[in-house]
Amino acid sequence: MQDPAPILRVRNLRTYFHADGTLVRAVDGVSFDVPAGRAVGLAGESGSGKTQTALSILGLLDTAPGIVSGDVWINQTNLLADLDAYCTLTLNGNPTVKKEVVRWRQVHEERLRAIRGRLVSMVFQEPKSSLIPYRTLRQQMRETLNVAQAPSDDDAIHALLEDLQFAQPRRIADSYPHELSGGESQRAMLGLALAGNPQLLIADEPTTLLDALTQRRVLDLLQKLVANTRVALLLITHNLAMMRLLVEDVVILFGGTVVEAGPVEDVLTNAPEHGHPYTKDLLQALDPSATLAATPLNTEKNLAGCRYFHRCRLKDALPESMRTRCLEEQPPPHPVAEGHTVACWARSDA
């Protein structure tokens, strides 16, 4: 059977922040696909680039003092096409960025306006700061439904809230954000994201504030959405147990780069010996008795070579020639099984 066409296609996405003569490579050459009817996960520790990748995809960093480049295709539209004409990066000497912010926003926003809230929606990490404080949830949901040209009557709003496991949908709909608990706010944010029946849903830690039972129900709802409506789901989380439950493919990020990608069973469940050492460390971190490197994540370490070298458990056993290569050349993704790639010189035949 032919694989479904991706709703989201990300190629060589780079997000660099420029401040005080320093360039922070928050996202550095990330590529992946999210097909229709499939759930894909972005995993990695805090600071690995997961949320910055999502914000870059949706154009929510366009006024930042930096540069977003690469290709982000949603269906047939490349959201970043030709935007490099309005933003240039110079790496010689002190890094500098020149950006025509007004023109960048005009071109970018025109493309985004056609897809945000219709083709793509996002559940943010901090729902309290994403909801409009002076409007009831009913007002916010009705506006979203009207934009999507979907039924926006009270019955439609209450039905959506019931799907999100609210026992009193009318009370919730008439509540202001400050009247909702953290868990209720999280589910309300999910309701707003789903109101327009998007083709792509980006969920950034969608169950962080929920109790275990409600978390399970929300995960069930997301699974049904993917299976029944063919929505493409991009799940962002550091919770590997959730990844195993919900996604079919996983992309592991470290230091803004993709270190491993493939079917979730190959990457996280079977934990093959040919996997990336960082993935193995993430899995070991689930064991409270495990001893792991305490080196903080630093996106500016070893920019020329493998970002993970300073933590790598393999480096001391490698021959000197390979250690030099790890330090001087960034490893590209190498296939280690069907649909499974690892960016590690020690796992490569090259």
Image: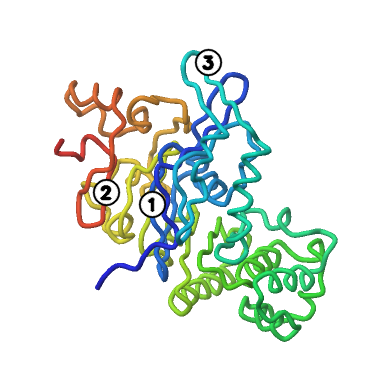
Callout 2 touching callout 1 (CB < 8 Å): no
Q: Amino acid at mark 3?
A: Asn
- First in residue order: circle 2 vs circle 1: 1
Q: Residue at x 43, y 48 (%)?
A: 288
Residue 323 in view, yes or no: yes
**Residues under labels 3 and 2: Cα distance?**
34 Å
- Give the label on residue 341, or none: 2
The quarter holding residue 66 reads: top right
Question: Which mark's residue is nearer the viewer, 3 or 2?
Answer: 3
Q: Position of residue 27 (x, y in %)?
A: 47, 39
Three-letter amino acid code at the position of disc 1: Phe
* Residue 294, position as x, y percentages in the image: 44, 33
Q: Residue furthest left?
A: 349
* Rendered residue at 40%/39% (across/down): 29
- The reply to whether residue 289 is in sight is no
Residue 333 is drawn in which quadrant? top left
Label 3 and label 1: CA atoms lie apart by 31 Å
**Which residue is denoted by mark 3 in the rendering?**
94
Q: Position of residue 304 (x, y in %)?
A: 35, 24
Type of residue at label 2? Answer: Thr
Which residue matches tag 1? 32
CA neighbours of label 2 inside 10 A, class few (<14), some (14 to 19), many (20+)? many
